Amino acid sequence: MQQNVLTETEVQGVLDAAQNEFAKHEISTDIQSLLSTGIQSQHLFSNDGSHPLGFSALNGSPPSMSDVVEMTIQRAKLQSIEIFSDGYAKLPSGCQVSAWEQAHHEVEQADFHKIAGFPSVKGSTITEHFDDRSVISLLL
């Protein structure tokens, strides 16, 4: 990979992997469009619980909640509460901000484009980086 630019083979590999993942849903046109236009078109699937590419979002419309997990944990078993944005592709070993940033750095080193070990629609390029990171950690 020269100057962090995807080769045609890598591009085709991403398209093939996405098509294979969702083959039973027959949404190849949607996948091709999303991957061709990039993250700027992802919003078209926000809060669409009926679409395989749909996801919950806090964007002013009612969230679909289709991918929200609700659970109860005994207070005595809690060590921390961490609220983080999707800018972090890997959970850290600790709950300090420095641990979250270290995990982010490890992801950037291992899978800059986010097409291998950390597949995501928000891969880094030579001019754009996976940078919408926010985290709140409450140690208990």
Image (spheres, rainbow, N blue to C red):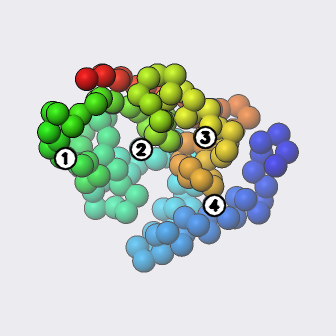
Q: What's the CA distance linking mark 4 and mark 1?
A: 32 Å
For label 3, the residue is 107
Q: Residue, x 55% and y 34% (percent of image)?
A: 103
* First in residue order: circle 4 vs circle 2: 4
Q: Quadrant of residue 131?
A: top right
Which quarter of the rendered picture does the C terminus lie within? top left
Residue 36 in view of the camera: no
Q: Are marks 2 and 3 in contact (CB under 8 Å)?
A: no
* First in residue order: circle 4 vs circle 3: 4
For label 2, the residue is 43
Q: Nearer the viewer, residue 116 or 121?
A: 116
Disc 4 secondary structure class: helix
Q: State the residue lying farthest toward the right.
A: 2
For label 4, the residue is 14
Q: Nearer the viewer, residue 110 or 65?
A: 110
Q: What's the CA distance linking mark 4 and mark 2?
A: 20 Å
For label 1, the residue is 70
Foreground mark, 1 or 2, reads 1
Image-based side of 86 in relation to 49, left or right: right
The disc labelled 3 sits on which kind of residue? Val
The disc labelled 2 sits on which kind of residue? His
Q: What's the CA distance linking mark 4 and mark 3?
A: 18 Å
* First in residue order: circle 1 vs circle 2: 2
Q: Residue, x 44% and y 31% (percent of image)?
A: 94
Reply above or below: 112 against 95: below
